[in-house]
Image: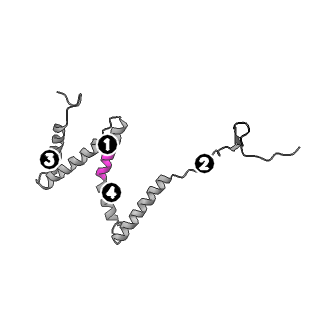
Amino acid sequence: MTAASPAAPTTPTTPGAPAVPAEPRWKLSVPWRSLIMVGALVLIWIVFSLTTEGTFLRPRNLSLLARQTAVTAILAVGMVLVIVAGQIDLSVGALAGFMGGLSALAYMNRQWPLGIAFVAVLIAARSSAPPRAGSWPG
């Protein structure tokens, strides 16, 4: 009796067709999208670091960048909650940007206190929006 050599498993095919080797149980999967995005980010950091003579990668600048992106991150979390809840409205981002611009104008050009500028813009946005059923009593 001779020992049979182990052969690669094959998938069943139609009669007369050559056997096709089955996929291995494990498959090496490379997250190409993530790697490309990280590579692009590193390339942008290198270009900014070279053009600003190293100022870009200093801790103070990175701290300021993190502070400035905090507002955008908070808006992004709010948008995710709206989308997950199924109440998607793509105009929320545009409205948030518009209201932020109006409050900045009220703060800088009219010299309003920042809190009052925010509240005034929120009231103006709410009063200009069309009424929806169940949104406010009345």
Q: Residue furthest left?
A: 110
Q: Earlier in the sequence, mark 3 or mark 4?
A: 4
With respect to residue 60, does 125 lie above or below?
above
Q: Mark 3 or 1 closer to N-term?
A: 1
> Mark 4 or 1, which is nearer the eye?
1
- Quick one: quadrant of the N terminus? top right
Q: Position of residue 116 (x, y in %)?
A: 14, 47
The residue to which callout 2 is attached is 27
Residue 66 has which mark?
4
In the drawing, what numbered circle is on residue 78?
A: 1
User: Residue at (34%, 64%) from the top-left corner?
Assistant: 59
From the viewer's side, name the closer residue of 107 and 9: 9
* Residue type, mark 2 in image: Lys
Q: Position of residue 73 (x, y in %)?
A: 32, 49
Q: Is 73 inside the magenta-drawn segment?
A: yes
Going 27% across and 42% down the picture, which residue do you hit?
A: 92
Please determine whether, in this image, residue 131 is positioned above or below residue 99: above
Q: Earlier in the sequence, mark 3 or mark 2?
A: 2
Q: Which residues are magenta?
A: 70-77
Mark 2: give few (<14), some (14-19) or many (20+) Cα within 10 Å: few
Tell whether 30 sits left or right of 80: right
Q: Which is closer to the viewer, label 3 or label 2?
A: 2
Mark 3–mark 2 distance (CA, rounded to whole Å):
58 Å
